Image: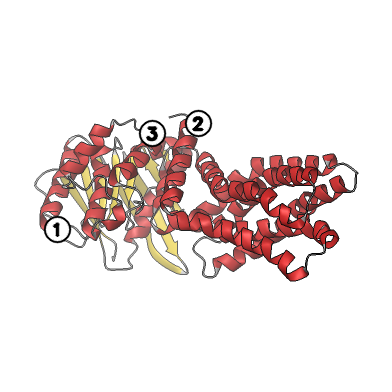
């Protein structure tokens, strides 16, 4: 489904990695590893089309992602370091705007259910800025429960979460993978995957 | 989701944010009110002089006031990551940007247009001159938002972006200033404001066509 051919990324004057090849099929998780500054985030941003690679290409369903544009955007969900939630909007409003822009027509009850599942029951109508760091992260992660995207690109998704939430997120990811979804993620935490095929790539090499 | 629904969604979102953060809206408006009100106090109650300078003062103040809020057009969304998420949605980015520009104008431009006739009274402006002033502001302030959006997108994430933004955008707004203030003068001197207003209209249409596309291109560069 997703394949990367001879990819090279450059940040400033520094070459982060070159000649990177991998392919990811349905129901697979790709766990990127590497020390700080090894280019994990750059690779993730390049995969979803936010940055241009210096060389090489990224293919989704055997077509270059640049040529797919809108079609690719519909199938990919990227969660970066930043939560992309507005502090002045409530959790429900944040998720509803995100879903509308993603082209998903959701009933408000679905959003309430998703918030309940990530443990934010009772916080739905508060402006997100009064929530804690971990709770803000949970609002962002609630998008995973609502999206129809096949490919999830997650940059350090476990940061700021307590151990119960980490466990829950792992289950959400495994559920997605069991349904034939694809996940690319980075994390410095040790995650015990109980199902699904997991590939690992070390970027330091 | 159609383009119109996307547009409405983004406008509603930005207006909600503006309503919950009223201070941002009022700084622009009060800046405009204060700058325009300072001139009669400084120059003195000579009504002939005041009538002559009125259109120019109102227009320069509108220009500066719109610069104040321009920086925040994309900066807040850039800082919390919403902007990159918007560019990753399957919606056409120019529609999203256009929605943001419209919301910005409703919040910062429209209050200026509505306030201008009231402030014009301090300058002893005639009633029809006030009418022309409002029409030119109605055509001109959207141009300021549209052109400002390109500058805001280009200077995103730069240190001292606010000053740079003014340096980029203000020169581009000179035609708007000339035809906007000129229209009022032409109407008071009996020449008729039609040609000036027509020029402003043309500038407006031109900005409407090119600004969203250029702003998107600039955003893609800034976000990388």
Q: Is residue B93 above or below residue A10?
A: above
For the residues tagged 3 and 1, is the chain the same?
A: yes
Q: Is residue B2 above or below residue A55?
A: above
Q: Residues within 10 Å of mark 2 (few under 14, many from 20)?
A: few
**Nearer to the camera, B182 or A16:** B182
Give me the C-alpha separation between circle 2 and circle 1.
41 Å
**Nearer to the camera, A59 or B49:** B49
Residue at coordinates 38% horizontally, 59% vertically from top-left? A42
For the residues tagged 2 and 3, is the chain the same?
A: no
**Nearer to the camera, A138 or B26:** B26
Q: Secondary structure at mark 1?
A: loop
Label drawn at residue A162? 1
In the figure, is residue A169 to the left or right of B66? left
Give me the C-alpha separation between circle 3 and circle 1.
31 Å
Label 2 lies in what chain?
A: B
Q: Is residue B43 above or below residue A118?
A: below
Q: Is residue B23 visible?
A: yes
Residue at coordinates 55% horizontally, 66% vertically from top-left? B161
Image quarter (top left, top right, bottom left or bottom right) of the N terminus of chain A: top left
In the figure, is residue B130 to the left or right of A51? right
In the figure, is residue A97 to the left or right of A201? right
Point out residue B183 in the picture as x, y percentages from the top left corner. 81, 47
Q: Are marks 3 and 1 in contact (CB under 8 Å)?
A: no
Label drawn at residue A103? 3
Q: Is residue B133 above or below residue A16?
A: above
């Amino acid at each position: 489904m997703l394949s990367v051919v001879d990819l090279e990324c450059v940040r400033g004057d520094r070459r982060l990695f070159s000649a990177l090849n991998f392919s990811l099929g349905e129901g697979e998780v790709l766990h990127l590893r590497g020390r700080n500054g090894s280019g994990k985030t750059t690779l993730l941003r390049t995969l979803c089309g936010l940055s241009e690679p210096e060389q090489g290409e990224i293919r989704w369903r055997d077509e270059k992602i640049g040529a797919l544009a809108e079609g690719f955007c519909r199938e990919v969900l990227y969660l970066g370091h930043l939560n992309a939630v507005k502090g002045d909007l409530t959790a429900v409003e944040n998720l509803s705007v995100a879903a509308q822009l993603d082209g998903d027509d959701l009933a408000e009850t679905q959003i309430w259910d998703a918030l309940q599942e990530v443990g934010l029951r009772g916080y739905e109508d508060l402006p997100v800025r009064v929530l804690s760091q971990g709770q803000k992260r949970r609002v962002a992660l609630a998008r995973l429960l609502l999206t129809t995207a096949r490919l999830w690109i997650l940059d350090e998704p476990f940061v700021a979460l307590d151990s119960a939430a980490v466990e829950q997120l792992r289950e959400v990811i495994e559920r997605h993978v069991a349904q034939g979804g694809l996940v690319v993620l980075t994390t410095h935490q040790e995650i015990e995957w109980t199902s699904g095929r997991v590939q690992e790539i070390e970027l330091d090499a | 989701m159609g383009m119109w629904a996307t547009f409405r969604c983004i406008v509603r979102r930005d207006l909600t944010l503006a309503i919950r953060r009223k201070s941002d809206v009022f700084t622009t408006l009060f800046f405009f009110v204060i700058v325009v009100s300072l001139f009669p106090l400084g120059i003195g109650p000579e009504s002939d002089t005041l009538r002559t300078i009125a259109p120019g003062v109102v227009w320069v103040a509108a220009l500066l006031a719109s610069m104040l809020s321009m920086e925040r057009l994309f900066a807040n969304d850039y800082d919390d990551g919403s902007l990159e998420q918007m560019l990753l949605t399957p919606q056409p980015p120019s529609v999203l940007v256009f929605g943001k520009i419209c919301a910005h104008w409703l919040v910062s431009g429209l209050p200026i247009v509505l306030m201008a006739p009231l402030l014009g009274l301090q300058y002893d402006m005639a009633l029809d001159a006030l009418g022309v002033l409002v029409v030119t502001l109605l055509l001109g302030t959207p141009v300021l938002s549209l052109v400002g959006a390109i500058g805001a997108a280009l200077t995103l994430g730069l240190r001292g972006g606010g000053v740079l933004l003014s340096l980029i955008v203000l020169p581009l707004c000179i035609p708007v200033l000339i035809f906007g203030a000129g229209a009022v003068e032409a109407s008071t001197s009996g020449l008729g404001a039609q040609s000036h207003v027509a020029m402003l209209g043309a500038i407006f249409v031109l900005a409407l066509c090119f600004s969203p596309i250029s702003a998107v291109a600039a955003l893609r560069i800034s976000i990388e």
